Amino acid sequence: MKRFDCLVIGAGPAGVCAALYLARFDVRVALVEKLAPGGLLLQTSEVENYPGFPKGIKGYELADALDAQLAPYANLTRIRGEVQEMELGQDVKRVRIDDEWHEAHAVIICAGVRYKSLGLPDEHKFIGKGLSFCALCDANFFRGQKVAVVGGGNSALEESLYLAKIASEVHIIHRRDEFRGAPIYVSRLKEHANVHFEYSTVVSALHGDTALEGITLKRLHSGKEEFLPVQGMFIFIGFLPAGHFLPAELEVDENGFIHTDLEMRTKLPGVFAAGDIRAKLCRQVVTAVGDGATAANSAFTYLERKHG
Amino acid sequence: MASAVTDNSFDSDVLQSSTPVLVDFWAPWCGPCRAIAPVIDELAAEFEGKVSILKMNVDENPATPGKYGIRAIPTLILFKNGEVVEQVTGAVSKSNLSVLLNEKALG
């Protein structure tokens, strides 16, 4: 059992920034991460909208740079592990990381999000065998082949642009009549002759023996179904909170995202949330680091009041 | 640290190995591969002598990933006596991989 002033859960941009601010406040802080630091930045090819990088920066480069800024602080402990359980209702909070319990006076939850899947019965069977959540990682395996992209937001459109340069055909499948993503992506995609827009369409079935060979498209207006042969399918239909360990007394929205006030305080004293796991509309690296700094400030104020 | 395996050394280091082998198929530009890299290194140290944990760069070694139908990275394949026992794709947590190694490699 180890005890800290503050535990920060998740080392994406929000968590790293919260840990940085707390370390500089001279708080005994532990940063918990199950993988390498960076969070969803590690799934992002190019970040073009983070201020200070006029030419853009690769997701993993920004992740490394954010993390490197924590190096000087001896009062910061890193814990590699996965949170399994939390007890946040009492004065001293308890968090079980793998098999070991840790205690802290304050907790900042920055656990981020995970990709939503389609929910088709045999979807799991095709993960890594044609079905992917990362075009940057896997596009090369589909060079010169036909692929589908499911989704209509910025992620779906960005990844489609990348795939258009590698795959022979890209079919963007979207349930609505128009895309939610930025118009700049749509106009760039229209310049590629191998990009096909399948509006008002959903994927109703996956086909293949050992690997994906095709999908069934269902046209929502006519109800008709048709087979589309594709070797790859990339899914970008949004996110769910990565908080399977959140206790029931934490207030969340209908999708499980954590409600906070503008100072990142949850309803539980000493418990704060920051970044993509928070119930909010704008999920960006720049808003995540802002949340992280605000949460750290609130946690510091809370600890000061508590200890006088 | 997990050591590297190549197309050339795959037969001797993996297929002919007397201990079970976990191979991490990865590439330097792949974010999720970077995400699990520290986990793979820690597991290599913890399972030393019991399970051999190796990394194959798919950019430099195209033959083996093709042979095993790899279409996504990171993909981790567990080999026992030259046969594929288990295949996992994506940034999996260390606790899940420890369970997998204990049950499928050593169990």
Image: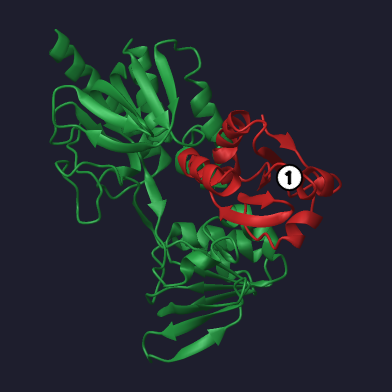
Q: Is residue B64 left or right of residue A257?
A: right
Residue A58 appears in the picture as rendered: no
Chain A visual colour: green
Residue A232 appears in the picture as rendered: yes
Chain B visual colour: red
Quarter of the figure with the N terminus of chain A = top left
Q: Residue at x 49, y 20 (%)?
A: A69
| Residue A72: image location, x then y, percent | 49, 12
Quarter of the figure with the C terminus of chain A = top left
Q: Is residue A282 above or below residue B4?
A: below
Q: Return the chain for callout 1.
A: B
| Residue A49: image location, x then y, percent | 47, 43
| Residue A146: image location, x then y, percent | 64, 74
Q: Is residue A93 left or right of residue B32?
A: left
Q: Is residue A86 above or below residue A147?
A: above
Looking at the rendering, which quadrant does residue A14 occupy? top left
Q: Residues within 10 Å of mark 1 (few under 14, many from 20)?
A: some
Residue highlighted by disc 1? B57
Q: Looking at the image, which is closer to me, A295 or A35? A: A35
Q: How is the image coloured?
A: by chain
Q: Residue at x 33, y 13 (%)?
A: A28
Q: Is residue A305 above or below residue A271?
A: above
Q: Amino acid at mark 1?
A: Asn
Q: Residue at x 30, y 17 (%)?
A: A4
Q: Is residue A281 left or right of residue A162?
A: left
Looking at the rendering, which quadrant does residue A290 occupy? top left
The kind of secondary structure element at disc 1 is strand
| Residue B16: image location, x then y, percent | 80, 47
| Count of numbered circles in the view | 1
